[in-house]
Image (cartoon, rainbow, N blue to C red):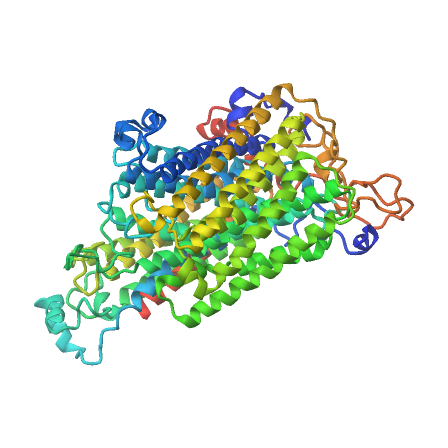
Amino acid sequence: MSNDHGHHKETFLSKYVFSMDHKMISKQFLITGIIMGVVGVAMSILFRLQLAWPDSHFPILNWLFGDKWAPEGRLDSGFYMGLVTIHGTIMVFYVLTAGLSGTFSNLLIPLQVGARDMASPFMNMLSYWFFFLSSVVLMSSMFVETGPASGGWTVYPPLSAVAEAMPGSGLGMTLWLTAIILFIVSALLGGINYIATVLNMRTKGMSMNRLPLTIWAFLLTAILGLLSFPVLLGGGLLLMFDRLAGTSFYLSDIYMNGIGAMEQTGGSPILYQHLFWFLGHPEVYIIIMPALGITSEVIAVNSRKPIFGYTAMVISLMGISVLSFLVWGHHMFITGMNPLLGTVFLVMTLIIAVPSAVKTFNYLATLWRGSIRFTNGMMFAIGLVSLFITGGLTGIFLGNAALDIALHDTYFVVAHFHLVMGSSAIFGMMAGIYHWYPRMFGRMMNKTLGYVHFWLTFISAYLVFFPMHFQGLAGVPRRYYEFNILPEFAPWLDVNVFITLAAILGGIAQLVFLYNFFSSMAIGEKAVQNPWSANTLEWTAPVEHIHGNWPGEIPTVYRWAYDYSHPDSDSDFIPQNVPDKGAPEEVSYEPVTPVAPEEKETPERVMFWGLLKNWLGLTKA
Amino acid sequence: MSSNAVNALPTWAGGKSPFRVSYGKFMMWIFLLSDAFTFSSLLVGYGAVRFSFPSAVIEEISFGQDLHEKYHDGFVETMQATGVFSESHWPSPDLVFNHFPFLHGLHLPLLFVSLMTFILIFSSVTMVLAVEAGQRMDKRSVAINMFLTILGGLAFLGCQAWEWTQFIGEGATLYSNPFGPVTFAALFFIVTGFHGFHVFSGVVINVIIFLNVLRGTYEKRGHYEMVEKTGLYWHFVDLVWVFVFTFFYLI
């Protein structure tokens, strides 16, 4: 198969830029995600400076943002809101959706199910380039005259719908919406591909009940994205028309000084919130489920034990997926919804605690009496479990409508979601990077630096987000610009200083990671084929990346992915492609070709430039 | 769960789809599923805005000849003056969409949109015939039916253009609506426009497939599955129209 492609001359463009190879696309997603992550984290540290020292002047801010947005080194209030908004958008969509799911779905789905590539490599490439374009458009929002979008990452109307509402509601907001629409296109192209690949392209013997839990998580994540992103697309289109064409889907009866301020009436701002959170809530599971899948794999491999409760893990993932569509109203308890409806959302929300708890208990049970190897990936996976529990517990508070009315829009909410989906998903992503780095780059990351990175990040995550619970319980609201104006909040200024110092520590820890990540590509120890003695199929492929993944036939799967420390075996792991010793030929497989039907004739299999030439008639088709 | 227990379960033989469809057709299905959610979000938005207004009380309107006469001397103005069209009531579609080309001055509620709907559904029929002919590898019949489908799509788009022109000519825009609340017109333009955009894309795709049929691409390939895939899309667009028609014109 790989030889079939020998006649395509690989140029720099076709190999590194417009690549249709899933392994290269996954690296592209990862590196773009890391760059966006650096920007997002740096933004959070910059606006934390303002929260800790509201009246101080920092020459660095002036140097970065100029006299307009940081006069004399103090952040402009509108620009502060812009930084908060762009930080949230980058972290939620660009790092933890595309950077996490895009990277690992692309890398692991074909390798772990035993496919040569994605179902449609061409769409896969388009998915990355829509994401890239979207990132560029989002960042350009920072550079327009009226400043970046600044209505918060949820961009509620009317702030987002009325271009004159505040400076950030102008062109910056339009660019934000454009970026998100491009992002949705990318997510849909990716998601359709992931689902089709998992269901249709599995190798012989890879039945659904033998899929590694990573793949289950990516599959369900893709389904969530497929069903929820289009709703934001619809909502975003309507918002775009409200902004640019004078419609009033989300605008109604805005009065200023007793006078109707706008001609646009007849719509409902709450409608936007419903459409947004119908995406927004599944979105948090789109973020956390790949991280949970990665954790399942990393914990099982490094405990040298089968994952505890494989079926329960799959069912709980399915349960989370279904429930995630039924709970969006818990973001809207204070919009004046019918108390009965609020109660329904409350009950649904609290039920999600059940599958989540099943997962955490299964992680603990897998660790229990395992021969644990504390690799860097394992440390981060255990870190995820810790943060997921801590953050999840406060979810039970916030899911209660009565408590949420008091806690809404306070730092309690900030603490909750940063722990349960922010930090834990980052930890899951880090676990994945450390674990699959040898698979991606053929080298090992430096272990010592990995430990330094883990401990600094783990400690700073708790130091940053834990005190916020107390702030929130005391009623400190989020998204405020200066806390020294209202005397009620003055006592919390010292805590803000503490949190900011911890955030700077966390930022420095990421520099260790960046150094380790990029330097290991060149100077890291060369990886062996299966450095973690893992069972899944990606470790049966050669270390160097080849088009088509396996030089010969795709391995056949004879067992599930978690045969670690099997009592009947001398080795402490049995890879999925090893047949049972002495067992009769258990399944009479139909003779099949390893290539999927249609593969040879699909024009998508031709490299991008070849395709373009065909269209332009430059070559004989 | 030991490996033996897992092995005891029926296993996957690989290389073919669990749903007996190729991955390409499967991807079309799941794309349509996601597109259905986009339309749903718009229609749910429509519902939320629609039911925040009471419906116009149409029992009090005298139909027939009376209305016909009023039509000539400012139908819309009369309706506004009598309070049938007001910003606080959702207008009755019967009174808004009552025109037909070349039949000026007649009150023909929903007749034109019925014709549009008929054309679109009929184009679905020709699409089915094309798919069926493809399964028989009958190139000529595929080409004829694809061509008829394209004609149907273009006819539908032409009808929609006429209806929009009529509606705009009476003063409806994205931010003004002589018939009632402004959101009525805005939603009409957005949702039927979004649907029309889908029809337009479908026509473009159909033309590409039609040309490929003529060039014999699929005959060489040995199957007409691409016709089937575009057929799925085309039927989906028709199905969506049934919902749009129901929500905007019938309710």
| Above or below: residue A138 compared with residue B94 | above
A142 to the left or right of B18: left
Quarter of the image where one finds residue A330? bottom left
Q: Residue A93: where, in percent of width, then height?
A: 46, 42
B190 to the left or right of B179: right
Q: Residue B184: where, in percent of width, then height?
A: 25, 62
Q: Residue at x 71, y 43 (%)?
A: A203
Q: Residue furthest right?
A: A582
Q: Residue at x 56, y 24 (%)?
A: A515
Q: Is residue B138 visible?
A: no
The residue lying toward the viewer, choosing from B212 and A300, is A300
| Above or below: residue A213 compared with residue A114 | below
B184 to the left or right of A511: left
Q: Locate the N terminus of chain B and report the quarter of the image it occupies.
A: bottom right
Q: Residue A573: where, in percent of width, then height?
A: 81, 40
Number of marks in picture: 0
Quarter of the image where one finds residue A149? top left
B43 to the left or right of A589: left
Q: Is residue A354 visible?
A: yes
Q: Residue at x 70, y 36 (%)?
A: A538
The residue lying toward the viewer, choosing from A621 and A399, is A399
| Above or below: residue A517 compared with residue A360 | above
Q: Residue at x 62, y 38 (%)?
A: A432
Q: Locate the C terminus of chain B and report the quarter of the image it occupies.
A: bottom left
The residue lying toward the viewer, choosing from A430 and A212, is A430
Q: Residue A163: where, in percent of width, then height?
A: 24, 45
